[in-house]
Image (tube, rainbow, N blue to C red):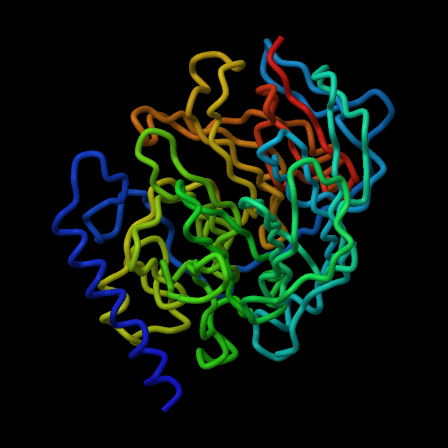
Amino acid sequence: MKRYLLLLSTVPFILSCNSQTKTTTKTDTVPTDTTTNALNLPAPDTGASKTKFSKVIGWPAEKTPVAPAGFTVTKFAGNIKSPRNIYVAPNGDILVVLSNSERNTKEKIANALTGKDKAEVSGSSANTVILFRDTNKDGKFDLQTTFLSGLDQPYGVLIIGNSFYVANTDGLYIYPYKTGDTKITAKGKKIVELPAGGYNNHWTRNLITNADHSKIYITVGSGSNAGENGMEHEVRRANILEVNLDGTGEKIYAAGLRNPVGVAWAPVTNVLWTAVNERDGLGDDLVPDYITSVKPGCFYGWPYSYYGQNEDPRLKGQHPELVKAALVPDVAVGSHTASLGLTFYTAKKFPEKYQNGAFIGQHGSWNRSVLAGYKVAFIPFKDGKPAGKLEDFLTGFIADEAKGEVYGRPVGVAVANDGALLVADDVSGVVWRVAAK
């Protein structure tokens, strides 16, 4: 009965998505063809999964990540515990969310992959939001405060009018706020209950609002790798949820997104995009993580298929109607790269090629024999659509590939009001600032 109810709740997506697909316009960035794309993916192999965990050695003095010629990289902030996400407030304040999650052990992840250990795999959190303010606009903060503490694995934060929102792993909370506040001491109110925790750090809940600030969108990752714990435990998960500002009126905006984390509105088209971490356990080059425009009411495959209608062999023959309905994502960004951060460059300080393009924070692989990710990647856009290949932008995080040693791991990315790109390096406790010379 539970599986039937879950399937029944998904049917409106198919109907809504099919209806919208028929009426797409030339500016719609979502592919209307739901067939498998031409990525030339290898065959899935459930026995080919490899693990290679990185060892973080920290950044030597005076060493920084490497940006292309014409850019400078400096340390905006350091010695902070696990900066995971970055939010630029309307007044220019930079809020850094400290949401540390302990690394899972190889044994825990292997057990989760095989379904032997059905306990949630999650770690501890710094549970704090730090405020940085640059009052003289020189690219260096001159005020740092503990803006909000006592949270429960926070990730997404959002300011709308006189309200400050925080997405903890267990729910959406609202606090009173006024422009210029440097600290919140009031008790928050939970306005949306969310399923907590999840497989391999799928505890993150990100937030974004629409142009008229009438809705809030919440990302909720799956509680498993590929539904191995039973889909009755995945209700309201692997989704982007939409709610009113008071938490009412919840509906599923899009489904079948295994672990959507980064969210941003594309310039020109004002279409919502998300960065999604795909599943593990099918080999080094499956399944590609991706960024994609998000079509309201549509289904993106998880867990029954991947990258369109490529059926997951572990769920072979299950719900072919959902497999048939699965949309192909827009851009593959590498398998197991853990692409978490996403922002569009809407400032004017970077060269023309970067205008309106997408920056992606790739935290880095573990379910692969060779390290992948561990960089900030870039995709050029034109007229609101991808207009070129994925390319490296901020590199140098890998210290020794053979030994698996890394200096740091980039996560959240954001564009400051002065046009610089800010990058959260959680394991090294640093926020990097990339500016055009």
Point out residue 344 in the picture as x, y percentages from the top left corner.
Answer: 47, 31
Name the residue: 69% across, 32% down.
397
The residue shown at (44%, 46%) is 213
**Left or right side of 136 for 86:** left
> Is 6 rendered above or below residue 238?
below
Q: Is residue 243 above or below residue 86?
A: below
x, y percent for residue 129: 73, 47
Hey, which quadrant is residue 353 in on the image? top left
- Residue closest to the eye, 432 or 420: 420
**Who is closer to the viewer here, 304 or 2?**
2
Q: Is residue 418 left or right of residue 299?
A: right
The answer to whether one can see residue 376 in this image is yes
Q: How many numbered marks have been drawn onto this rendered protein structure?
A: 0
Regarding residue 273, the answer to whether it shows in the image is no
Residue sticking out furthest to the left: 22
Q: Quadrant of the N terminus?
A: bottom left
Q: Residue at x 46, y 40 (%)?
A: 264
Q: Relative to 147, is 25 on the left or the right?
A: left
Rendering coords of residue 377 (x, y %)? 53, 31
Q: Residue furthest bottom?
A: 1
**Quarter of image, res 266:** top left
Instruction: Please determine whether, in this image, residue 322 is positioned above or below residue 150.
Output: below
Residue 402 vs residue 37, the one in the foreground: 37
Query: Which quarter of the rendered picture does the C terminus lie within?
Result: top right
Hey, which quadrant is residue 414 in on the image?
Answer: top right
